[in-house]
Image (cartoon, rainbow, N blue to C red):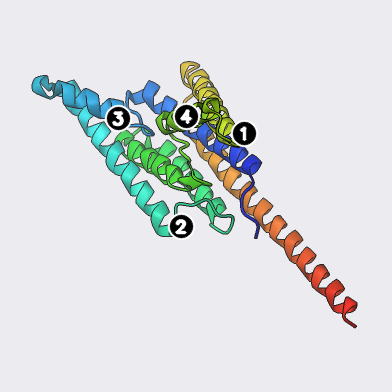
Amino acid sequence: MRPFTPSQTVIGGCLLAFGASFLNTGFLLSTGTSVSHLTGDIARIGSGLSTLGNADGFHMVNVATATFGFILGAIISGFLLHHPTLEMSKPYGRILSALGISLVAAHYSYLNFPILSIAIASAVCGAQNALASRYRGLVLRTTHLTGLFTDLGINLGMKLRGHMVEAWKLSIPLFITLSFLLGAIASSTFVLADKDNWMLVAGIGYLIGGIAWSVYKRTRRVEQDGAGTYGEHEASNAHK
């Protein structure tokens, strides 16, 4: 099966970034805890340890849960995919569908067990971020933007210096950043409008995305197998 094209990588990365931002923004507005990029939260805890109060202690538990959940999700992706390079043969569709089902469960557990929802959502983000971390030398991150901004700056600086830099290496960070922003706007609209089903919407979105990718992948495989069989048949006839 052929490798991913840059256009497929851009579209997939944008959809995943939109989903991660939608999820993360919902938790930031609802609980004050990030589930996709934890650097700021951990820094806040570190800076406030000397005056730790009850509210800070509660936040510390949330951030610790999100951190361990994120790491666990990345471990699960590493175990299932075996390699961080983006490859068409990997079961991305099934993993995304499983993440969607997990978010549906997190939605129904949020009212009574919000800490469990934080753990599940952070694990989803960790698993998503580890789905593919490399593509043709470019580091892919769809749950936070710092690495993408770094790659954008490096490649843009090289291009200004006169080096040959492929256009997709500049477009991927830009489009993913835009998708991340749109995801935050969409999630804010849901939460601030007192819509309690924002996490359910995210879960259904992941589930549909996983199913759609599995169907697309199977269709492509059938088409390629058919083309290969036809080519072998023509070659056989040519030698007769």
Q: Residue at x 52, y 31 (%)?
A: 173
**Side of 178 relative to 143 (left or right):** right
Mark 2 vs mark 1: in front? 1
Q: Nearer the viewer, residue 176 or 197?
A: 176
Decide: is 106 above or below 188: below
Measured Cα–Cα span from mark 2 to mark 3:
26 Å
Decide: is 19 above or below 72: above
- Per the image, the residue denoted by label 2 is 81
- Per the image, the residue denoted by label 4 is 21
Classed neighbour count for the residue bearing mark 2: other residues with Cα under 10 Å, few (<14), some (14–19), many (≥20): many
Measured Cα–Cα span from mark 1 to mark 3:
30 Å
Q: Residue at x 58, y 35 (%)?
A: 164
The quadrant the C terminus occupies is: bottom right
First in sequence, mark 4 or 1: give its number.
4
Q: Is disc 3 placed on a helix, strand or loop?
A: helix
Residue type, mark 4 in image: Ser
The x and y percentages for residue 57 are 17, 27
First in sequence, mark 2 or 1: give its number.
2
Q: Residue at x 40, y 29 (%)?
A: 146
Q: Residue furthest top?
A: 192
Residue type, mark 2 in image: Leu
- Per the image, the residue denoted by label 3 is 39
Image quadrant where residue 59 sits: top left
Residue type, mark 1 in image: Ala
